[in-house]
Every structure is written in structure tokens, then in C-alpha cells.
Amino acid sequence: MKLQKPSLSFWQIFNMNIGFLGIQYSFGLQQTAINPIFLYLGAPEDMLPILNIAGPVTGLIVQPVIGALSDKTWSNRWGRRKPYFLIGALLGSLTLFAFPHSPVLWFAVGLLWILDVGNNMAMEPYRAFIGDKLPEKQLSLGFQMQSLFVGAGILLANGSIVLFQYLFGGESLESGIIPQWLYYSFFIGAFLSLATILWSVLKTPEIPPSEKEVLEINKIKSLPLGHKFRKPFLEIMGSIKVMPKFMWKVGAVYLFQWYALFIYWQFTTPLFKLTMGYSTSEAASQAAKMSLTYNIVTMLVALALVPLTIRFGGKKVYALSLVGTAIALFTIPYISDPLFVLAPMVLFGIGWAAMMGIPYTMVSKIVPQDKRGVYMGILNMMIVIPMGIQTLTFGPIYKYLLDGNAINAMLFAGVFFAIAAFLAMRLNEKTKG
């Protein structure tokens, strides 16, 4: 019998999602500050994709495994998803505190690996957490609330970078030394990563498992250690074999969408060095302002997308948002004014709000309740696989096919967003097939 979940108030949904603020603040630093740090420490531009391989690799392994484990976890004290939130947040917090102290490039790259493990441990169960707690009629609000906090977290991260550079900046960033003003943003992230997760953990009780689920969980606890280790991997493979066709179609959209997003995040700073003649410091600051702009838009429109998706369907709203993102990337390389170049970020912000909410809502409605964690993990595999492909392939593409030109890189990403929009129109929400 299907569990009838009570509807939650707006503020209950708000509180259960506040932990996403800290996770996305950390993600915002990865988008805007990590690649400039690599450049400060001497990384060549064509090496940026491969230096970001940590995200795809850890996401590919950690998210589905944690999803499978959390499906089969229950503690009367800590719950099902919360233990993974807390461990991931603590790991991320410690790494963010250490990151700006990186003395050399290899040290910073190593910390990125640890940071990505922590963020993935916290993020994946959070997606399943929404599906666990909310009835179907509130799923759109729940995931779009997460989208709002995506915007808020990244907004705070980039706002802090711009603010602290304005207050304490001025030193040269071409000497291989990470500037002191950048430290403060990472220290704030270290605090928020843990504090916001604790807020959600303390404010939101989890729904206990059914008797059938408890029996399954206890059965797994009694297995030998080797069997326990293999269990989540077998769970993932078995779930992929019977995965709804709809999820394969989402995977096709994600292939182009996330490949393009990784290009945008990696090459915004090199783009502004080329189109505006900026130093690394100035280009990184402009990239932060771009991120500020589109995440403000994301915050403003995230919840507004809920009635639009109800009226017109998630597929149409999602596809149209991807078209807008493509237009934004086609436009950015041809604007040399640092103020006017913020205008395309309105379209990018609408697209980002849709990307971070609508697909999760659609998938959560069609996957089995007792496998929501593993399927959310598989959905996130569909994010990191394109990222992994991008990190391995785009360096040579950029160097040899695109003539090492950041303008061409941004246009390339725009084409991929246009393809993603076309594929999004193939998503049929009415069936599980």
C-alpha cells in the first residue's frame, strides 16, 4: 500500500531545504574561485578541464553508492539520509577551511577531490530526502525550493568574492600566490557547510521506514562484510537494468547540458582575459559578477516556475529555458562592456533555475519509493558522466580544434545547449516508459 504523506507548510519545506544553502555555497566557490586558484598557482588554460576531473569521478562513484546505502539505512536517532548529510558537510567544511592555504597546484587539486567527496555525500541524499518527505503534489515546490537555495548559496559565494576583493584586494595575482582577500569566502563556506545542514537536520524529522523496509535493512546488517560492500554496487547495476525509459531520455539531455555547463564555468575567466583584456584577478572578479547576476535571477524565478510547470508542463518550460541559456552563451563573447555583459545572465539564471529543479521533480514522480535514493544517485551519474567526458576531451578540442580561443569555447557550449533543448522536447511526463 502506498504511504500517504501529509502535506507540509511552506516554512517546513523551507527549513528542510536550508542545508542546501551551504552545499551550494561550496559549489559556488567551485564554479568561480577554484579555477582561478589553479591559474594563480600556475596551471595552463588547456589543463583546466583535466584538473576538474575530481567532480565527475567522485560524483560517478559517491552519489549512487551513497544513494543506495541511504535507501537501506535507518537509525531511530539519526534517521535515513541525515547521517550522510552530516558526514559530507563536516568533510566539506574542513576542506574549505584548508583550500586557500594551498601552497602549490597539486595540493589544491588534491583538496578539490576531498571537497567533491564531501559535497557529493551531502547532496545526493538531499535529493532523495525531498521525495521521502513530500506528497507528489508538493514535489515541484520542494525541488524548486532547492533550486532557490542553489541560487542563494552560489549568490552568497560569489557576492563574498566580489565584496572582499573590493574591500581588501589590490595585490598582484600573477605571482603564484593566492590572494589573502579570497581566504574569507572559503572561511564563510566552511561555517555555512556545517551550520545549514545542522539546521535542516534538527528541524526536519524523517519518516520511519515500513515494517517491510525494516526487515530488509536488518537483513542487510546481518550480512558478512564482503556482502555488505558489494550490496550497493549490485543495487545500482540492478536498478540501471530496469530503469524507466524516461530516465534514459533525461540522460541524453544531460549529456549536452552538463558538458556545456562545465565549459562555461571553466572558460569564463579566460574569456574575459581575451575579450576585455583583463588580468586573472579582474577576469575572476567579472566571472563572479556574472555568477552573482544569474543566481539572483535564479532565486527570483525558482518558485515562479512552479505554477508555470503545472500549467504548461515541465518539458516545455525546461526546453525553453535551455534555449534561453544557449542564446546567452552565443551573446556573451561579443559584448565587451563589463556592465552590458551581465544582461545575458537573466536568461542563464532562468535556465539554471529550471535545470536544478524540473528534471528532479519529473524523475521523482516515476521512480519507486524504496529506491528513490539509488535512482537519484543514478540521475546524478548522468550529470557527472558528461562532466567526465568533458574533462577528458575538451582540453584537446580547445587546443587543436578551437585554436585555444575562449570565444570559440563559449560558442561551442552554446551549440550544446541548443541540442539539449531539442532533446528536452522528447521528454514525455505522462508515462513511466
Image (spheres, rainbow, N blue to C red):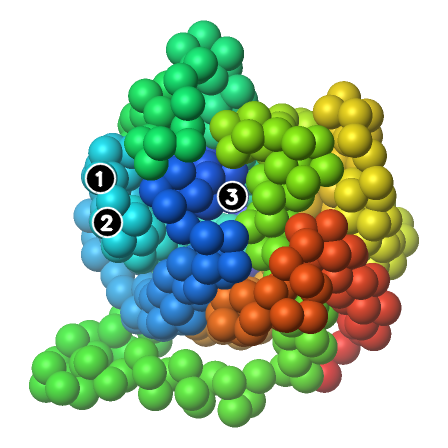
Image x and y of residue 75, in percent? 21, 56
Q: Is residue 201 visible?
A: no
> Which numbered circle lies on residue 31?
3
267 lies above or below 336: below
Q: Earlier in the sequence, mark 3 or mark 2?
A: 3
Q: Which of the image's four quarters has the C terminus?
A: bottom right
385 lies above or below 317: below
Q: Secondary structure beneath disc 1?
A: loop
121 lies above or below 422: above
**Labels 2 and 1 touching (C-beta < 8 A):** yes
Pointer 3 local density, CA inside 10 Å: few below 14, some 14–19, many at least 20: many
Q: Secondary structure beneath disc 3?
A: helix
Q: Amino acid at mark 1?
A: Pro
**Labels 1 and 3 touching (C-beta < 8 A):** no
Q: Earlier in the sequence, mark 1 or mark 3?
A: 3
Image x and y of residue 417, in percent? 77, 60
Q: Amino acid at mark 2?
A: Phe
Pointer 2 local density, CA inside 10 Å: few below 14, some 14–19, many at least 20: few
99 lies above or below 240: above
Residue displayed at 36% across by 71% down: 61
Image x and y of residue 22, in percent? 41, 35
| In this view, the mark in front (1 or 3) | 1
| In this view, the mark in front (3 or 2) | 2
Q: Quickly name the residue at label 1.
A: 103
Residue displayed at 10% across by 82% down: 225
Q: Amino acid at mark 3?
A: Gln
Image x and y of residue 165, in percent? 47, 17
Q: Quadrant of residue 314?
A: bottom right
Q: Quadrant of residue 54?
A: bottom left
Q: Residue furthest right?
A: 312
> Which numbered circle lies on residue 107?
2
Residue displayed at 25% across by 45% down: 104
